[in-house]
Image: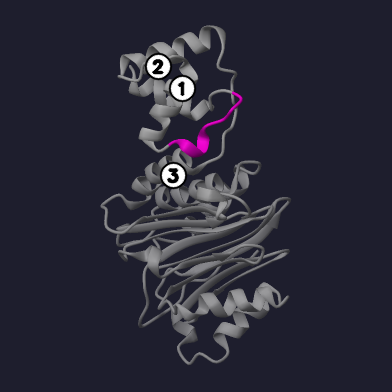
Amino acid sequence: MHLGRRIAATVGGVTFSIVGQVGEAFGVAVASKFPFVGSVVPAARLGVGAVATQALARVGYRDTALAALEAGRGAAAAVRACRDPDPEREHRQLGVVGIDTQATSTGEACLPWAGGRSGRDETGGYAIQGNILVGPQVVAAMEDAWLRVVGLPLVDRLLAALLAGDAAGGDARGRQGAALYAVEPSAGYDQCGVLADVRVDDHPAAPQELARLVRLNDLMFGTPTDVQPLEGELAEEVGARLASIGYAAASPAVALATWASAENYETRLSPDGIDAKVLAALREAST
């Protein structure tokens, strides 16, 4: 692992991010004083890896780095493929994670505090980087959070790391934009492979708003988990709760399908019963 040093600089953007992997899932979480940061920093590709470009971000780094990974080159080689032909490379930061490979890079001219850490655990690699931070404690807190929640799904780990960086002070000028983008085979709406694509373009507490939207994204686009059979007392409860909010039907299952469709929870419907998160949402809606 490498912890970047404090460095002098003349130009740059303001961002902290984590690029991570859990099994076949790859993604990026980022926050910044820069609004619309989600349109610039993150990229990920199924079966390949993920990239974050920041500071004086170069959007073209995303395709260059992913192409290098897809060609079988390591993360360090992907970083070189971006930096070597770029005369502005010392003003840029880059994080890259691929299959069995990871790297973070901070140019000498990035605004202080700037630096990063990269490493690997039993589930995959990570790269954490930031510039114009309150200090090195931001990336340290992000790494600690990432490693502390090993065993959780990728999106949960990315969000935990980002919120830890925010709590440690994050961007010295504040956090106005945030985003989380992640891919995993067969995940998301219509099994398109997009696990999460959530952006907060302009908000005074962007990381916290991102967390709220990421949880909503999971409720709407996640797959059924902890499904309980819709029978006995649970069936009676579900039927009564649905009826109380105007969704009475011949059976709780029919009423549930109608309500879930109206609330956009279709991806969490299961023929085996009711998903735990849908049940929690129903209990909240009918309280």
Amino acid at the residue labelled 3:
Asn
Q: Secondary structure at mark 2?
A: loop
Label 2 close to label 1 by CB (< 8 Å): yes
Q: Of discs 3 and 1, which sits in the foreground? A: 1
Q: Position of residue 212 (x, y in %)?
A: 38, 42
- Chief secondary structure of the magenta span? loop
Of residue 53 and residue 107, the one placed in the foreground of this image is 53
Which of the marked residues, 2 or 1, is nearer the chain's N terminus?
2
> How many marks can you see?
3
Q: Quadrant of the N terminus?
A: bottom right
Of residue 254 and residue 223, the one placed in the foreground of this image is 254
Which of the marked residues, 3 or 1, is nearer the chain's N terminus?
3
Which residue, given by chain and number where applicable, does mark 1 sit on?
Answer: 254
At 33% from the left edge and 64% from the top edge, which residue is drawn? 36
Which of the marked residues, 2 or 3, is nearer the chain's N terminus?
3
Residue 130 highlighted magenta (yes or no): no
Q: Note whether residue 32 is visible.
A: yes
Q: For the magenta stretch, what is the residue range?
A: 265-272
Amino acid at the residue labelled 2:
Ala
At 26% from the left edge and 52% from the top edge, which residue is drawn? 204
Q: Badge 1, how many Cα within 10 Å: few under 14, some, many 20+? A: some
The mark found on residue 8 in the picture is: none
At 59% from the left edge and 25% from the top edge, which residue is drawn? 227
- Structural distance between the alpha carbons of marks 2 and 3: 28 Å
Amino acid at the residue labelled 1:
Val
Q: Quadrant of residue 116?
A: bottom right
Which residue, given by chain and number where applicable, does mark 2 sit on?
Answer: 249
Q: Badge 3, how many Cα within 10 Å: few under 14, some, many 20+? A: some
Q: Work out whether 277 lies above or below 146.
A: above
At 43% from the left edge and 45% from the top edge, which residue is drawn? 214
Q: Quadrant of residue 113?
A: bottom left
Which residue, given by chain and number where applicable, does mark 3 sit on?
Answer: 217
